[in-house]
């Protein structure tokens, strides 16, 4: 593959800015006034999947958090602050957890080949594989196994979202965003909606809203 040089990248930036300004001279002035993105995208850091490019979304539409193998990690202060800001302050309407096939993190977890910090990071996926080993090992090819593990990983991350106090509070206050679990197939470029059911996570009738607690 032919990569852009640093000089190319800077040149491309100037060319793109000029092009945008031709269409709308106030484009960047408007961008600078603030953001109100409808989407929070949680995805893998993999260089091959800038979701904005795959979905033709514009600057200002997606608030983004990316890490290796798109983990919703309940002890990751970086992730949690992104989630809190997106839900409490930006009031995003949708949260998209988007995994992908041909994911190095999934592969490393499946094979147990990761080393160093990445090993620790992908260990929950390794655990997931061991939990679902019977289902996964039945699949006919290595790729089919990896693909299924990538899908199951998305389902777990969607479930994890509902374990955060941020989501629970939003649910109680009935301002929770809709959550979507997707995988992007790098081989076809297409996004598959896994239609992960989130219904079971919606109601906590026994839990009063936080403001009710404060009043007592
Ligand atoms: Co990946």
Image (cartoon, grey):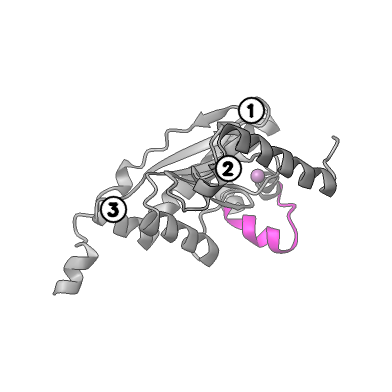
Q: Disc 1 or disc 2, which is closer to the eye? A: 1
Q: Where is residue 140 in the image (x, y as percent from the top left)?
A: 65, 27
Residue 200 location, quadrant = top left
| Residue 63 in the figure: left or right of residue 114 | left
Prevailing secondary structure of the magenta residues: helix
Q: Which residue position is annotated with label 3?
A: 171
The stretch in magenta equals: 111-124
**Mark 2 or mark 1, which is nearer the start of the sequence?**
2
Identify the mark at residue 133; answer none if there is no mark.
2
Task: Using the image as rendered, state which of residue 68 and residue 36 is in the foreground.
Answer: 36
Tag 1 near tag 3, CB within 8 Å: no
CA gap, disc 2 to disc 3? 33 Å
Q: Can residue 102 be seen in this view?
A: no
Q: Which residue is at a point 55% across and 30% down the rendered structure image?
A: 191
In which of the image's four quarters is ligand 1 placed? top right
Inspect the magenta stretch and tell me whether residue 15 lies in it: no
Q: Where is residue 58 in the image (x, y as percent from the top left)?
A: 54, 38
Vertical position of residue 96 compared to residue 67: above or below: above
Q: Position of residue 46 (x, y in %)?
A: 68, 45
- Structural crowding at the residue carrying mark 2, measured as other residues with C-alpha within 10 Å and reported as few (<14), some (14–19) or many (≥20): some
CA gap, disc 1 to disc 3? 33 Å
Assign a secondary structure to mark 3: helix
Task: Using the image as rendered, state which of residue 123 and residue 76 is in the foreground.
Answer: 76
CA gap, disc 1 to disc 2? 28 Å
Assign a secondary structure to mark 1: loop
Inspect the magenta stretch and tell me whether residue 116 lies in it: yes
Identify the mark at residue 189; answer none if there is no mark.
1
Identify the mark at residue 216; answer none if there is no mark.
none
């Amino acid at each position: 593959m032919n990569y852009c040089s640093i000089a190319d990248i800077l040149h491309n930036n100037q060319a793109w800015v000029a092009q945008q300004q031709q269409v709308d001279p106030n484009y960047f002035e408007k961008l600078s006034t603030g953001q109100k993105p409808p989407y929070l995208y949680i995805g893998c850091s993999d260089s091959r999947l800038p979701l904005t490019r795959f979905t033709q979304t514009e600057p200002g539409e997606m608030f983004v958090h990316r890490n290796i193998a798109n983990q919703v990690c309940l002890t990751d202060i970086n992730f949690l602050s992104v989630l809190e800001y997106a839900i409490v302050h930006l009031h995003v309407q949708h949260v998209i957890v988007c995994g992908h096939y041909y994911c190095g993190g999934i592969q490393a977890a499946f094979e147990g080949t990761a080393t160093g910090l990445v090993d620790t990071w992908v260990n929950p996926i390794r655990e997931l594989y061991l939990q679902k080993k019977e289902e996964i090992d039945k699949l006919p090819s290595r790729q089919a196994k990896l693909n299924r593990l990538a899908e199951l990983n998305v389902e777990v991350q969607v479930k994890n979202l509902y374990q955060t106090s941020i989501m629970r509070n939003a649910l109680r206050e009935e301002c929770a965003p809709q959550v979507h679990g997707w995988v992007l197939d790098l081989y076809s470029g297409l996004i598959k909606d896994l239609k992960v059911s989130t219904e079971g996570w919606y109601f906590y009738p026994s839990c009063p809203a936080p403001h009710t607690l404060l009043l007592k």
